[in-house]
Amino acid sequence: MKKIFLILITILPIIVFGQKTIEGKYCSSQDFVGFCIEFTNDSYFIYSSWTCLSNNIGKGKYEIKSKKLILKFESSEKYIANRHELKKVHCQNNDSIKLKFKVYDGTDSLILPFANIILSDTKFENYNDSIDFGKLTNALGVAEFSLLKENKEIWVTVTYVGHRNYSFKINLLDCQDLKIYMKAYNIGKIENEVFKYKLKKINEKEILIIDKDSRNKILLKRKE
């Protein structure tokens, strides 16, 4: 038994640091300064950091090599532009549809309560324009509309303080769940840079790294 225990102690670091891929979103403590790294199973990552004054975002490919976590940043435009995801869902009523909107910050995917959702026949430019329907998202970032089912397109415009307005078209033939990701005005891009961290521990729940420059230990915990 003692021999087996010693063997396990010997091979465990090899297993841990021989791991080539990570999956999931890991974040430092949620203070006024911090960062998150979201790893995908195709060796890509999305990095977002924040301070009291600004936010930064970047994406690229990562490596785990020689007990180091290496982040190689590429172009990040795709991840900081306003965008939305649309999913058609089953309607309970043949004559009407339901639209469910959930609004997030595009940098860290935090929900945005009290965002303004505007539905109109023409593209909304300012508050002098005609508005057919309008609602604020609730504390969970959600707003819902019940509308007459018809074969027509309408404009959706989402506004939120400190973020760029976002407009796009949808059709009123189907019930839909929509996730909206809003770009903040003060987001900066990280491109064509390489971040290197000394890797001390990695598992499904947390990653412990050491910053190469400051030599500070940073504990990143997985977000569910």
Image (cartoon, helix red, strand yellow):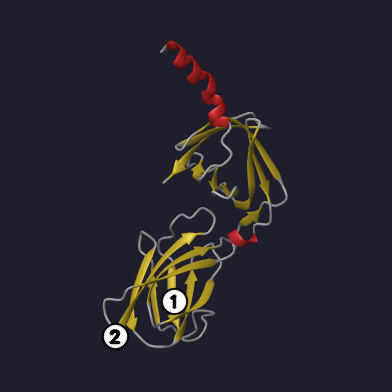
Which image quadrant is residue 179 in?
bottom left
Q: For this view, does 119 lie left or right of residue 219?
A: left
Residue 18 x, y percent position in the rendering: 58, 32
- Which residue: 47% across, 42% down? 30
Q: Amino acid at mark 1?
A: Ile
Q: Position of residue 40 (x, y in %)?
A: 54, 49
User: How far across and how far down the image is residue 70, in percent?
Assistant: 65, 39
Which numbered disc, 1 or 2, marks the residue closer to the eye? Answer: 2
Residue 55, given in percent of the width and then of the height, sits at 59, 52
**Which class describes the residues within 10 Å of circle 2: few (<14), some (14-19), or many (20+)?**
few
Query: Front-most of 103 and 65?
Result: 65
Single out the residue that lies furthest toward the right: 192
Q: Tell me which residue sits at (68%, 57%) in the image.
A: 75
Residue at the (49%, 75%) spot, across then down = 157
Estimate the spatial distance between the alpha carbons at disc 1 and disc 2, rounded to whole Å.
22 Å
Residue 118: which disc? 1
Q: Label 2 amino acid?
A: Asp
The mark found on residue 95 in the picture is 2
Horizontally, residue 62 falls left or right of residue 155, namely: right
Quarter of the image that includes the N terminus: top left
- Helix, strand or loop for disc 1: strand
Please tell me whether mark 2 sits on a helix, a strand or a loop. loop
Where, by quadrant of the figure, is residue 65 drawn?
A: top right
Looking at the image, is mark 1 or mark 2 earlier in the sequence?
A: 2
For image coordinates 56% across by 62% down, the residue present is 183
* Count of picture labels: 2
